[in-house]
Image (cartoon, rainbow, N blue to C red):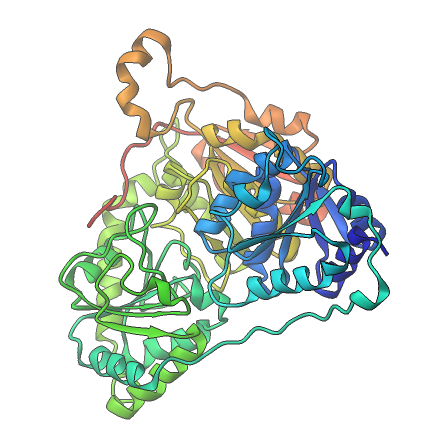
Amino acid sequence: MNTIEAITEILKREGVQYLPCFPTTPVIEAAALGGIRPIICRQERVGVGIADGLSRVSNGDHMGVFAMQYGPGAENAYPGIATSFSDSVPILLLPLGHPRDRAGVAPHYNSLKGYADITKAVEQVNVADRTSDIMRRAFAGLRQGRGGPMAVEIPADVALEEVSEESFYYAPSRPTVSQGNPADVEAAAKALCAAQYPVIMAGQGVLYAKATDELLELAELLQVPVCSTLLGKSAFSEIHPLALGSTGPTISGHAYHFIRRSDLICGIGTSFTKHGMVMNIPPGKTLIQATNDASDINKDYNVDLPIVGDAKLVLRQLIEACQAIVGNSRKDDQSTAKEVQSEREGWLSQWRAKLTDSSTPMTPYRVIWDFMHTIPPEDAIVTHDSGSPRDQLTPFYQSNGPRTYLGWGKSHGLGTGLGLTMGAKLAAPEKVCVNFMGDAAFGMVGLDFETAVRSNIPIITVVLNNSTMAVETRQMTDSHALYGTRDLGGNYADLGKAMGGYAERITDPNQISAAFTRARKVTEEEGKAVLLEFITNEEVEFSHRRPF
């Protein structure tokens, strides 16, 4: 077999079923002949997003892989890879490389240099007989420690070279995980049990470690309220009585109340990153941080009680240590749960008018509210795009079950949600997979809705069309008066139909729920991708935006 055929065999042994890709690269043909289904996208960034969504929803059990040609293909994939890197998502990248006699000659793009800052590691198959070793290192890197992209560049001439039989000996590697230092766990448990107003903050490390049951057990043992990072949203069921929802650029009223008052925040599976699409932790809190990456400790905050270890194992250690301190004495105390409910109801009462507003053009909050009450959160996988759709959706939408929501945003390129949703649907075809995007995001990647149509990936794309740029560009008022710089236009439902999908344009807020019901029926019974365009107002109010 040649190098490309060897790589295809390795992908099959690793359980890879789909190959998001963009021509031209011989990997596509070899994968198709080998039984791996190519998903050819319109642009590389979306293809990387599809691989990203596959890895997230499968929790890294089945790695997302993206293949592209050398030069412009590798260049165009860069922003998608940067997003996956910033969100620590394990995906494998297979860029074709220039033939060795052209490599390194200006101005040819070099993936080894270009990807160095946005991958955990990048390596080149410079000799065909090294294919097994290089691919083993790549998949091992995807499984070990902090997640993130791994890249293997395949020079076009090496791709077709023969791999000797004795050099091909590939077997998938197994991940290793570690407990926390018992002394560190004991110190954290004592502080957690002694705190008067503790809050647990769950990151996506809880999801990758499959530790949602342990997180629930610890929260109920101590009756401690739980919030999540944006990346960790859905690690703790948000319909649970102790749930505060996710934190990010905007947060719920009850999350604001409990986090502001807290004397201790216990972060599990989170990097405690400051700035970006995260909530900054207010000063004066005792911090516990459990992470599988020691470089997270004391990165942006002074961490009082650090623990380095796998989230599932550390949570089990904390449960046992806390039981030794307080037993089960707190499990039946419902006072915190009642306070969470009271604060939530008080916050919702302030927003009820917007959430149920029947005026036109409709507010996006009415779209979100009716959607949440039409499609049960446990049946769905929901994601957002950056900007206003993210900041409007995350405080109000209640996820219910691991990976029923894909939060993202440390590197917030418009249009990321569309690829993520397609990958989510491939990984979990039984789910109703929905992405919320604005008209500006549609302008970036909207033609890849045709990828979903052509590839028979029945997702629901929601376009919140307010016919203008996002609120972040309101400072453009003067130039807008002269040149109309913030005006956007288009009938996106017509575009969806022209691309072969099912599409509706909804202007009446009283038809929101019915539209979502029809959309779900079309995806499930006809297997078609759906685009719903809602004509909304230019909403400028947000729940506790940048609160700390």
| Residue depicted at 78% across the width and 51% down the height | 4
- Location of residue 24 by image quarter: top right
Place of residue 195 in the rendered image (x, y in percent of width and height, measured from the top left): 17, 76
Visible residue check, residue 159: yes
Q: Residue furthest left?
A: 284
Of residue 217 and residue 181, the one placed in the foreground of this image is 181
Image position of 534 (left or right of 174): left
Indicate the quadrant containing the N terminus: top left, top right, bottom left or bottom right: bottom right
> Residue shown at 53%/41% (left/top)?
114
Rendered residue at 53%/54% (across/down): 381
Left or right: residue 155 versus residue 164 is left
Q: Position of residue 127 (x, y in %)?
A: 73, 54
Q: Is residue 514 visible?
A: no
Q: Residue at x 24, y 45 (%)?
A: 546
In the depicted structure, whether residue 120 falls above or below residue 285: above
> Residue 213: horizontal and vertical position, in percent?
45, 75
User: In the figure, residue 361 lies in which quadrant?
Assistant: top left
Please name whichever residue, 283 or 111, is drawn nearer the observer in this view of the structure.
111
